[in-house]
Amino acid sequence: VQLQASGGGLAQPGGSLRLSCAASGSIFRIDDMEWHRQVLGKQRELVANISRGGLTNYADSVKGRFTISRDNARSTVFLQMNSLKPDDTAVYYCKAEVVPIGTFVQFDFWGEGTLVTVSS
């Protein structure tokens, strides 16, 4: 199972970016999908998560600005980031709770990070 994230880049304060993360491989089912972020020298933090049924949860710092969504048919999770602030600058990582084909066990898989820089 692999997760491929894309969509990072440079945005101005107040601007928007949309991150995508597609899972591929021998997947039977994907449960929760999440976005985390990490600033150099700090702990990785949860930004948002979404259940298979679409229930969402957000960090207080991004509520009202970020929206997480998913496309179960394409095993993809998105993060729409609006009203970006310099404090949102970080490497963003996606995570998926995956039950691989042929198992009855859930594993956590992480994508490679994508850098988001918010600066004027």
Image (spheres, helix red, strand yellow):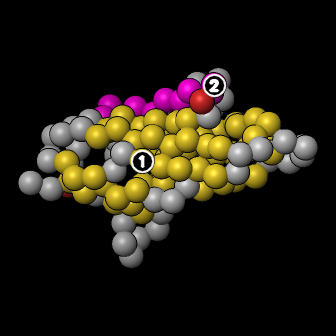
Residue furthest left as drawn: 120
Residue 49 placement (x, y as % from top left): 54, 39
Question: Is residue 10 found left or right of 49 in the rendered image?
Answer: left
Residue 101 placement (x, y as % from top left): 84, 42
Answer yes or no: is residue 60 visible.
no
Residue 54 to residue 46: above or below? above
Q: Amino acid at mark 2?
A: Ala
Residue 81 to residue 106: above or below? above
Residue on which disc 2 sits:
73
Question: Is residue 30 found left or right of 64 in the rendered image?
Answer: right
**Which quadrant would residue 17 be assigned to in this image?**
top left
Q: Amino acid at mark 1?
A: Ser
Residue in the picture at 61% in, 43% down: 23
Q: Which residues are magenta?
A: 63-73
The number of numbered badges drawn on the structure is: 2
Marked residue nearer the N-terminal end (2 or 1): 1
Residue 65 part of the magenta segment: yes
Query: How much space separates mark 2 and mark 1, taking CA atoms?
Result: 18 Å
Residue 2 to residue 28: above or below? below
**Which quadrant would residue 109 be assigned to in this image?**
bottom right
Q: Which mark is residue 6?
A: 1
Residue furthest front as drawn: 25
Which quadrant is the C terminus positioned in? bottom left
